[in-house]
């Protein structure tokens, strides 16, 4: 009885102490758009950009303080962005400036 009670107390505490595993968010590039158009993520997560389109796209972050350019992704290619800083930024495709995705990274 006493042991069961201690296990009950320890269970949630142990869960709380284990850091959350980094998540992966998948963004598809198809039909000249990123899908989804917005992402809420945690620090340390990654975004995998998959080009499902028939044309080349790009992953470029113009937001000051978050600048990244993963370069050109030809059809069928992927690129991964590691979210190493909390905050909000925008990703755009330099070839198609109307292609945009808003990313919010929380701690
Ligand atoms: Cu594009």
Image (cartoon, grey):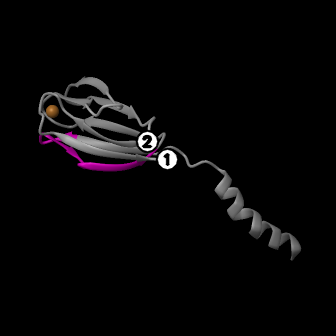
Give, as a single range, the part of the protein colored magenta: 29-42
Cα separation between marks 2 and 1: 6 Å
Q: In the structure shown, which secondary structural element does the residue marked by tag 2 occupy?
A: loop
Residue 28 vertical position relative to residue 15 in the rendered view, above or below: above
Choose between 106 and 64: the one closer to the eye. 64
Element type at mark 1: loop
Ligand 1 appears in which quadrant?
Answer: top left
Tell me where residue 64 sits by quadrant: top left
Q: Main secondary structure of the magenta part?
A: strand
Question: Marks 2 and 1: CB-CB under 8 Å?
Answer: yes
| 10 or 50, nearer to the observer | 10
**Along the viewing direction, whichever of 10 and 75 lies nearer the viewer:** 10
Asked whether, in this view, residue 84 is left or right of residue 75, the answer is right
Q: Is residue 88 above or below residue 74?
A: below
* Label 1: how many Cα within 10 Å (few below 14, some 14–19, many 20+): few
Tag 2 residue: 86
The residue indicated by pointer 1 is 107
Q: Residue at x 81, y 72 (%)?
A: 4
């Amino acid at each position: 009885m006493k042991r069961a009670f201690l296990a009950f107390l320890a269970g949630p505490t142990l869960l709380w102490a284990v850091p959350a595993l980094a998540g992966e968010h998948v963004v598809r590039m198809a039909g000249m758009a990123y899908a989804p158009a917005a992402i809420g993520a945690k620090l340390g997560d990654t975004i995998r950009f998959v080009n499902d389109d028939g044309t080349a796209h790009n992953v470029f972050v113009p937001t000051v303080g978050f600048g990244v350019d993963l370069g050109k992704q030809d059809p069928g290619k992927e690129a991964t962005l590691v979210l190493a800083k909390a905050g909000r930024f925008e990703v755009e495709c330099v070839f198609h400036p109307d292609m945009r995705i808003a990313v919010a990274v929380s701690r």
